[in-house]
Image: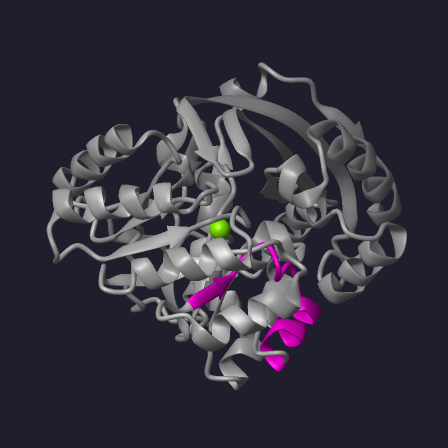
Amino acid sequence: MRKAIIHKIEIIPVMIKLHEPFVISKGALTHARNTIVKIYNADGVYGVGECCPYRSIHGETQTGTVAFAKDLATALIGADPREIHTHVALMDRMIVGNASVKCAFDMALYDLVSKVDGLPLYAFLQGDKEKIIYTDNTVSLLSKDRMVEKAIKFKEMGFPVLKIKLGERSSIKDVERMEAIRNAVGNDLPLRIDANQGWNYIEAWRALHAMKDMKIEHCEEPVQAGNTVDQARLTAISPIPIMADESVFNHKDAYKVLSQQAAHMINIKLGKSGGICNSMKVAAITQAADVYCQTGSFSESRLGITALVHFDMVWDNIIFHDLDSPLMLSEDPVIGGMTYQKDWQVTVDNTPGHGADFDPDFLKRFETYTIK
Ligand SMILES: [Mg+2]
């Protein structure tokens, strides 16, 4: 039987305006500048991947992802798309880091291969279709009053949990924000917080102790990523569980952070680990360590989040889900894929592959680079 090798790869940098700027302690984002990768086999079947490079987190820009994607595409033409581990290893040999662009290729390969096999991606990965997944919604780092306003609105929209962006110094302002938000939404709505590395050890210590009775599920990345010493001493004394996000990109980071007890939980993002292949390794390490995880996103469209939902269905220790990035975009350029139910449960159907694709009319607005 003829093997359907990789025949053609398209690279498409796109831009989608956000409804309003998304603000975290590292700065504000007004547009998602995502890079799309379509990998075709010789039979004309294709898989689609997406990445959203955050320069303040990945050290990648959209221009950089396109430049490297061209090199990578050239190296993959003629290869067997099924050899995903080999292709991930090749990407790592060709360039260090650059997890974001690697994720777009990995996602397209998984989509293509599961499509060819006629299996929805969760089934290809041996996941559980019955797993129940609800998303939170995220409140940007704004003035206290504006954050309260947003929290009330999201509660009224029925979100089962809210994630609050913090990380301002001095952290006393963050404590005031959280007091006001907790008062406004009442005691029953679960809240989680994310400082995006904005505090130092002292500010984090103060904030976490001041918030200890506010019923907060966990705090993401309180101090500078890579500062394992402070992360570990904070994890040891924090009354609120600490979740590693920017400090765990891939499985090697997960092993380091867990072995040094520098977090209680880990936030897994396909765009940090370089895609599904390496995210499976992060999840396996956390499962072995009995550590709970969250799935999270950058500013991907529904396509990137669809792939993430399929991945989420594989792992019963992923119990938190931050899958709200498509809700922040001013347009939805994706056909098929994941659906938000009215109670914010997130579901996928049994379409082969991840089941999502970009609207061709949307893609026509942008330049396509084709490698054959
Ligand atoms: Mg985070």
From the top left corner, tell me how far across and down residue 186 is, in percent: 11, 50
Q: Residue at x 44, y 62 (%)?
A: 205
- Residue in the foreground of this view, choosing between 206 and 132: 206
Q: Residue 214, how many percent across, how many down?
A: 23, 59
Residue at 84% of width from left, 45% of height from top? 77
Give the residues drawn in magenta, as a range: 242-259
Q: Is residue 53 visible?
A: no
Q: Is residue 295 above or below residue 165?
A: below
- What colour scheme does the image use? one colour
The residue shown at (49%, 47%) is 297
Query: Is 331 placed above or below 78 here?
Result: above
Kindly tell me whether residue 339 is visible in this rendering.
yes
Report the side of 43 relative to 26 (left or right).
right
Q: Nearer the viewer, residue 106 or 10?
A: 106
The image position of residue 340, as x and y in percent, is 28, 44
Q: Is residue 254 magenta?
A: yes
Residue 269: horizontal and vertical position, in percent?
54, 55
Q: Within the magenta stretch, is there residue 244?
A: yes
89 over 19 or under it: above or below: below
The image quarter containing residue 40 is top right
At x 44%, y 30%, the residue is: 22
| Front one among 252 and 332 | 252
